[in-house]
Amino acid sequence: MADQEIENAVSRALEEAPDRNFRETVDLAINLRDLDLNDPSNRVDEGVVLPEGTGQETKIVVFAEGETAIRAEDVADDVLDSDDLEDLGDDESRAKDLAEETDFFIAEASMMQDIGRYLGTILGPRGKMPEPLQPDDDVVETVNRMKNTVQLRSGERRTFHTRVGAEDMSAEEIADNIDVILRRLHANLEKGPLNVDSVFVKTTMGPAVEVA
């Protein structure tokens, strides 16, 4: 369960958000300090599974063949085989569009080398290289887990953002998601909480409220 102060900040952000004619996401802005982000080893770049889900549709594309592809069709937004991969390699514009509109890619481990060859220059710089699916992995379970995953990625910037929910989720649910993200950051940053300068929560168009 999240700290009450986090939940209070989320409640304020939800209450102070002006009414909009669309469903807003709830985002977290994280400001880092005392880290040399020119050194790639200090950058934040990892996926976090949110216990209460993202509150949004997450588009997932699977590269697979055979039985794995058949099973993936029930849960993924699209399933592409080796021929599709080659076609994408020959159509840079289509490959870029797919990369931009897809949240996560998953691929059978046996296809990763070809994905690197055909799509590495497009997916790599966007931080969207597929999560490898090992022979013993359950593709349905993996896709469902990824649907509740957000990516924490700082790059070279001291401030970065991530989605933590949607405005129609409860403050408690969103706070639980934030709690998991902050715990992960504190565990993985060089100096833990000391590397976090400040954290703000806000709806898409609403005011930012300080969490920590």
Image (tube, helix red, strand yellow):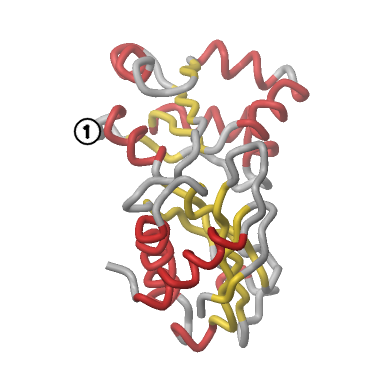
Q: Amino acid at mark 1?
A: Asp
Question: x and y percent of residue 5 in the render?
Answer: 41, 78
Q: Residue furthest right?
A: 93
Answer with left or right where residue 176 lies relative to residue 24: left
Question: Which residue sits at x=58%, y=35%?
Answer: 116
| Quarter holding residue 16 | bottom right
- Tell me if mark 1 has few (under 14), some (14-19) or many (20+) residues whose alpha carbon lies within 10 angstroms of its own: few
Residue 111, percent across and down? 45, 27
Depth check, front residue: 1 or 161? 1
Q: Is residue 17 above or below residue 57?
A: below
Judging depth in this view, the residue of 78 and 109 nearest the camera is: 78
Residue 172 image-quadrant placement? bottom left
Q: Which residue is mark 1?
A: 136
Q: Is residue 101 left or right of residue 46?
A: right
The picture places residue 57, in percent across and down from the top left corner, at 49, 33
Q: Is residue 89 above or below residue 182?
A: above
**In which quadrant is the N terminus drawn?**
bottom left
Q: Which residue does the image show at 70% across and 68% down from the upper left?
A: 156
Residue 126 versus residue 99 in the image, above or below: below
Q: In this rendering, would 153 be left or right of 110?
A: right
Res 24 quadrant in image:
top right
Q: How many marks?
A: 1
Q: Nearer the viewer, residue 7 or 87?
A: 7
* Image location (x, y in percent) of residue 195: 54, 84
